[in-house]
Image: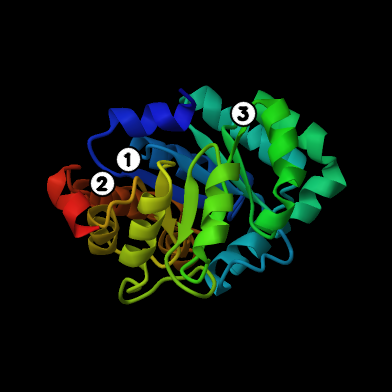
Amino acid sequence: MNPYQSCFSKLNRAALIPFFVIGDPSYDISLQLVKAAVDAGADILELGIPFSDPVADGPTIQKADLRALKAGITPAKALQFIREITAYKPIPIGLLVYYNLLVQYGTERFLQDFKKAGGTSVLVADLSIDDADEIAIPAKKAGLETVFMATPNTPDERLRRIAEKTTGFIYTVSLLGTTGERQALSNAVRPLVARLKRLTDKPVCVGFGISTPQHACEVARAGADGVIIGSRIVKFIEEAPDNPEKMRENITRFLSEVRAALPPKGPTAKTDA
């Protein structure tokens, strides 16, 4: 049983998965904020290495990338960050990264170093499932799980290929477009989760556009195994420049509210899917 299977199986609700850009707005503040998220009840962490051209991300996370890059975060410093989080509390850590960063570092060497730092899985946001073995093979060799993305317009044939290449969980994109806060949850969530559940028994986690505890509750009721929240959390950092304590308070309160809103798993959630 891999770390994700162990995590999902012991939870009687969807997993709470906050996303942070490593080093936003600085290495030390980011470290304290991620630790606060762990203390607030995060079940899994999704962490991103800042990149100059994050094509999957909207303006909020793009600005977070720029803050972190300005703070001098490099892949090597990101690995040190992960080592410090793992030392603070063992928790599954998924890494979201763009392919060029891996190539520049050396893909096999990076994945091995990430595993040694305490990492669990890798998701390359700009890698097509057609090129999955570029990551799946070295990830397996390093002892890491793989995470691939599914979108609302992905045909069933490709969903099956995504499921075949995924060993961790399927990162299910709730909408068409980039990351970012939304007023309402996309109508695409329920049918996409239902399609995946019919095609595979791999865990399904939903991200993109989940901005409120009610959104998280709706995603969980749709049958998702995990709820990934990024832009709303990153926005708390943007909204309180020069006030790390305010950032920490807002993130802690928000994650506590989301966790409390997640319903227990049961027949109702499956029926709703």
Within 10 Å of disc 3 (Cα), the crowding (few <14, some 14-19, many 20+) is some
Q: Secondary structure at mark 3?
A: helix
CA distance for labels 3 and 2: 26 Å
In depth, the one of 9 and 90 nearer the eye is 9
Residue 271 percent across, percent down from the top left = 17, 54
Q: Hey, which residue is sitting farthest front in the picture?
A: 157
Of pointers 2 and 1, the one earlier in the residue sequence: 1
In depth, the one of 128 and 93 nearer the eye is 128
Residue denoted by label 1: 40
Q: Secondary structure at mark 2?
A: helix
- Say the numbered circle drawn on residue 229: none
Residue denoted by label 2: 259
Mark nearer the viewer, 3 or 2: 2
Within 10 Å of disc 1 (Cα), the crowding (few <14, some 14-19, many 20+) is some
Residue 62 percent across, percent down from the top left = 61, 68
In depth, the one of 134 and 61 nearer the eye is 134
Residue denoted by label 3: 83
Q: Amino acid at mark 1?
A: Ala
* Residue at image location 60% in from the left, 32% down from the top: 119
Q: Amino acid at mark 2?
A: Arg
Residue 47 percent across, percent down from the top left = 56, 46
* Residue at image location 77% in from the left, 36% down from the top: 110
Instruction: Answer whether labels 2 and 1 touch (C-beta < 8 Å).
Output: yes
Instruction: Answer whether labels 3 and 1 touch (C-beta < 8 Å).
Output: no
Residue 106 percent across, percent down from the top left = 85, 40
Q: Secondary structure at mark 1?
A: loop
CA distance for labels 2 and 1: 9 Å
Up/down of 59 relative to 113, above or below:
below
Residue 203's quadrant in the figure? top left
Locate residue 29 relative to residue 127 in the image: left or right.
left
In depth, the one of 254 and 3 nearer the eye is 3
Residue 67's quadrant in the figure? bottom right
